[in-house]
């Protein structure tokens, strides 16, 4: 039996991103078609590099209000609704994904083929994110799959140090009005 709340050490993570429209096992990846793990290269081909850190976050809408209090006066009723889930991932390498988002290219980068920068006005890429939280002993504490969009939070910094780009993956709960069935988080037993 798995006890996620009892984990003491979460050392690091591994991340993979398979872009929408990619062909995997003769199927086109979409909100309805998630890559499987046979072969494992279905995911590892989309490695995000060395993950320095990842941080989960939410966007909330405040819907608090004030009501009359039986003790007199008014009292505040706190109400907040989560409207978005995301994870920020900082890496050590500048993958093609980072360069493409930073430059605003409309297509994948092909070596030796010029593209016009800045044509992508809404700089995001849709696809499947797999994030593995790994503990000190080398076992996965959780494996999470999200259909999401990825945007660049921090790109290249030319300051004499190695750039550490940061990507934000924002989960899509629905696609074309249909619940995304493949979104999942699994806490494997350790």
Image (spheres, rainbow, N blue to C red):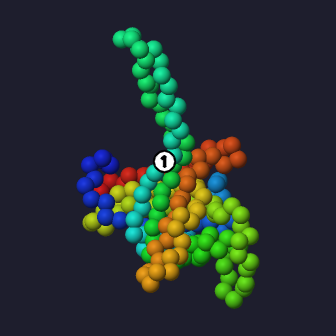
Residue drawn at 68 percent across, 82 percent down:
110
CA neighbours of label 1 inside 10 A, class few (<14), some (14 to 19), many (20+)? few
Residue drawn at 39 percent across, 56 percent down:
142
Residue 159 at x, y = what percent? 46, 81
Horizontally, residue 47 falls left or right of residue 187, namely right
Residue drawn at 33 percent across, 54 percent down:
189
Q: Is residue 56 above or below residue 154?
A: above
Residue 27 appears in the rendering: no
Quadrant of res 91: bottom left
Quadrant of res 55: bottom left
Q: Which residue is mark 1?
A: 58
Quadrant of res 114: bottom right
Residue 53 at x, y = what percent? 40, 65
Q: Which is more toward the observer, 118 or 136?
A: 118
Residue 153 at x, y = what percent? 53, 64
Q: Which is more toward the observer, 126 or 37?
A: 126
Q: Is residue 77 above or below residue 120?
A: above
Q: Is residue 142 above or below residue 95?
A: above
The C terminus: image quadrant: bottom left
Residue 46 appears in the rendering: yes
Q: Which is more toward the observer, 93 or 185?
A: 93
């Amino acid at each position: 039996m798995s006890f996620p709340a009892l984990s003491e050490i979460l050392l690091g993570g591994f991340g993979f991103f398979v872009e929408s429209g990619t062909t995997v096992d003769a199927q086109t990846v979409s909100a309805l078609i998630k890559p499987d793990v046979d072969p494992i290269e279905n995911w590892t081909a989309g490695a995000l590099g060395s993950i320095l850190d990842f941080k989960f976050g939410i966007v909330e809408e405040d819907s608090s209000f004030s009501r009359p209090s039986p003790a007199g006066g008014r009292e505040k009723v706190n109400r907040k609704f989560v409207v978005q889930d995301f994870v920020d991932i900082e890496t050590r390498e500048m993958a093609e994904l980072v360069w493409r988002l930073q430059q605003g290219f409309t297509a994948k980068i092909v070596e030796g083929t010029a593209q016009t920068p800045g044509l992508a006005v809404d700089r995001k890429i849709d696809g499947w994110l797999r994030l593995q939280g790994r503990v000190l002993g080398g076992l996965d504490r959780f494996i999470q799959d999200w259909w999401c969009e990825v945007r660049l939070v921090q790109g290249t910094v030319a300051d004499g140090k190695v750039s550490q780009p940061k990507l934000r993956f924002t989960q899509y709960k629905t696609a074309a009005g249909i619940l995304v069935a493949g979104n999942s988080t699994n806490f494997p037993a350790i």
